[in-house]
Amino acid sequence: MGSISSKYRGRGLGLELWQAALNRFGDRIVGLDGVVAQQENYRKSGFRLAFRNIRQRGAGGGAAPAGLTDLLTVPIEEIVRYDGSAFPAPREEFLKSWLRQPQAVVLGAVAEGQLKGYGVLRACLQGFKIGPLFADDEEMAERLFAGLLARAPGAPVFLDTPEANPAAIALAERHNMTPVFETARMYKNGAPRMRLDRWFGVTTFELG
C-alpha cells in the first residue's frame, strides 16, 4: 500500500480534488473545521474565519441532577424540532443513528411538554466525548452536563466548546476543564444562520 500511495504523492492531485469539490458546491455555503495553522491556505480558497472551537478535557463523575429525561423516550419529531432551533440544517436521519450509538448516554431537559435542551455522551478512543450539548440557557446546559458527567465516573471527558458562546467557555471553566486542542470554523460563500447561544458543545468537529 505504501508504494502505491507514494507513487501519487507530490503531483498536486490533492489540490485538484479540493478544487473540483469546491467547484461542485458552486455558490452554496461550505464550511469546515480546520487546524489553526492552515487558516491562511483556506483563505486562499475563499474561506473566512467565523469562530474557534476549543476542545476541553475534564473528568467524569459527580451526582446527576434530578429531572432529566432519557432522550430516547422523547418523540423523534420533538428532538428534530429542537435540534433545528440550534443547528442550521435538518438532520433527522443523522440523529436517529447518533442517538443510538453503542455505549451512548442521551439526556434531555423537558419543560411544559417541550424539549429545552439535550446532550449526548459517547465513547471514544480515550474516555468519552459530549456532543451535541444544546440548551436554551446556561442553567439548563449545566444540568445536562452534570447529568452526562455522572455517567462517566473517573473517565476522561471531552467537550468541544464554540468560543463564540462565552457561556460555553464558562461552563468548561466551572468544571476545571483544560483546553487541549482547537480548530478554526470557517465558511465560504457566507455563513449559515444558527443559534450559537444554544451551542454549549459541538456535535463533532467537521461541522457537526
Image: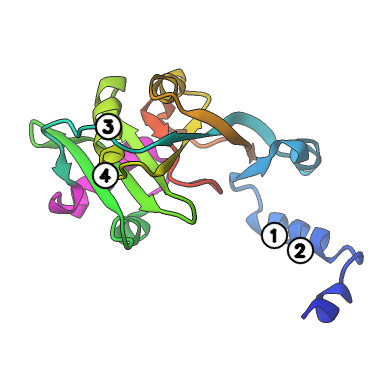
Q: Are marks 4 and 2 in contact (CB under 8 Å)?
A: no
**Element at label 2:** helix
Boundaries of the magenta span: 71-90
Q: Is residue 5 left or right of residue 148?
A: right
Q: Quadrant of residue 143?
A: top left
Identify the mark at residue 151; answer none if there is no mark: 4
Residue under label 2, please give it: 17
Q: Position of residue 99 (x, y in %)?
A: 30, 55
Can you tell which of label 4 and label 1 is closer to the viewer?
4
Left or right: 147, with 18 as reference point: left
Task: Give the residue at mark 1.
Answer: 21
Q: Quadrant of the N terminus?
A: bottom right
- In the image, taking residue 116 as reference, residue 127 lies left or right, namely right
Q: Please, what secondary structure does the residue beneath circle 3 have?
A: helix
- Tag 1, which secondary structure? helix
When asked about the image quadrant of residue 22, the answer is bottom right
Gap in Å between the C-alphas at discs 4 and 3?
Answer: 9 Å
Distance of label 3 from label 2 (alpha carbons): 43 Å
Whether pointer 4 and pointer 3 mark residues with C-beta atoms closer than 8 Å, the reply is no
Question: Crowding near pointer 1: few (<14 within 10 Å), some, many (20+)?
Answer: few
Asked if the magenta segment contains residue 193, the reply would be no
Residue 167: which quarter of the image?
top left
How far across and how far down the image is residue 172, in percent? Answer: 43, 25
Pointer 3: what residue? 146
